[in-house]
Each structure stands twice: as C-alpha cells, then as structure tokens.
Amino acid sequence: MFGEIKNFHGERIDHSFHQGDANSKNLVVLGHGVTGNKDRPFLVTLATALAAAGVNTLRLSFTGNGASGGRFVDATITKEVADLGSVLDAYAGWNICYIGHSMGGAVGVLRASQDPRIRLLVSLAGMVSTAAFAQREFGTVKPGAGFMWEDEACPLSQAYMDDLTQIGTVLDAAPKVKVPWLLVHGTEDDVVPIQDSKDILIRAGSDVEFVPLQGSNHVFAGEHTAPMVETVVNWVKGRFA
C-alpha cells in the first residue's frame, strides 16, 4: 500500500501488501526465518488466506534477505528487530499483529516486549533459545568461511553467531509481552524444537494460546499448511474483531 520502506541504515525493506478490508486499519505483518524471505510458500499461502478473510497483510523480507537491500552477512536478530520497527513507523496509526516464523518469531518477542504498537503476536515455530540454536545448527561451521546448511548463498557470519550467543534466549522478554499471543509449533520440527514454545509458554502472560500441530515440520509443509493457516486466520480474526 505504501511506497518504499527503508531501515535506519537507509536499506530498502522489500515487502508485498495483500489487500483485505480496504476500510480497516488492522494489519498483519509477516516476518520470515533465517535464510528465508517473504516469498516462502507457506507465508504466501497464509497472507493470501488472511486477505481473503478481510485482514490486510504485509509480507516483508528483512534486510540482507530476498530482494531487500543490505548484506546477508549483516543480518542478525538485533538488526531485524530494528527493521520491524521501521515497518511499524511506516504504518503508524495502524493496529498491528506481527506474525514471525522461526528466527522471525524471536524478533517478534523482542519487539513486542518493548513496542506497544504491536497489538497481537503470533509465533510460528518461534526460536526461543537462540544460543542453543546457533551451536546446534552451526557450531561446527567456521564463521567467515563456511555456510549455513551448506548453502553458498548464505555465508555464516561472526556477527550472526555473536548476536545469537549474546541474546542467549528470549525467555526473559516473554513476561513483558502484554498482548494476546498465539504459539503454533509442529511436533516434528527438527530445526527449532517444540520445547522452545513449551518453555516460553511457561514464562508468558495469561493471554497466550499454544497449538501444537501433530506431525508438522518446521515449515508446516504439505498437509500441515492448511491447519496452520486455519488456526492463525481464525485466531487473528477473532482477536481483531
């Protein structure tokens, strides 16, 4: 809907807007995980379904990812928290629901814990134990020389590893999230274990709902896309009503 959005560094944040109710100021902002972008199939499917249900939705690629400006090696959780702030600046006055997948889920917890402009929060397979993730997935890869999951388009940077290690976990931010919160996680997630969502559920406030999706992997593939989309759309519509 709006034109170009740039972050604090002047880097362009690529985004796609899905029109729902043109008279509504409710907006879902969708954020992706590490090595991802706004065009992950399940995010496109979710955005399309939200718009069809009348909810305006914006998919974004954090800087350094997809068609956004910036360098992949500079992409960190901390930088993406700031990127999300720039998007919220662009949509000042709107009622924002942020939905974050994986690392984008950690971004959402950290932003929502300090920014009242986020009115609703959804974590899809949300990363919680960031330091543990860094060591589990990339502990044997040399930063500056190796790649994330052997993908040469995704070099592993020292900045990324340092940021995840310094954050450690987003558990301490959970009690500071004062808005309605939905946690959705697949029971067969081998990237971010479902235990992350179980752990943060204990620290979250009273207005939180946890939906485990039996058999689903990290990206809600195949037959698990539809129940994830239905769960999220129904929850968002109910909370925005």
Image (cartoon, helix red, strand yellow):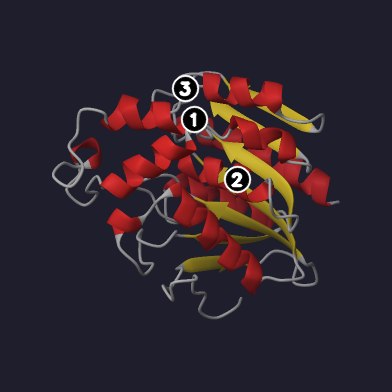
Q: Amino acid at mark 1?
A: Glu
Bin the neighbour count of mark 3 within 10 Å (Cα to Cα): few under 14, some 14-19, many 20 and up.
many
Q: Which residue is mark 1?
A: 223
Please state if 184 lies on the left or on the right of 16 as rendered: right
Labels 1 and 2 touching (C-beta < 8 A): no
Bin the neighbour count of mark 2 within 10 Å (Cα to Cα): few under 14, some 14-19, many 20 and up.
many
In primary-sequence order, the first of circles 1 and 3 is 3
Pair 1/3: label in front: 3
The answer to whether one can see residue 229 in this image is: no
In primary-sequence order, the first of circles 1 and 2 is 2
* Residue 226 higher or lower than 15, as above or below: above
Numbered badge on residue 112:
none
Pair 3/2: label in front: 2
Q: Which residue is mark 3?
A: 193
Q: Residue at x 51, y 62 (%)?
A: 83
Alpha carbon distance from label 3 to label 2: 19 Å
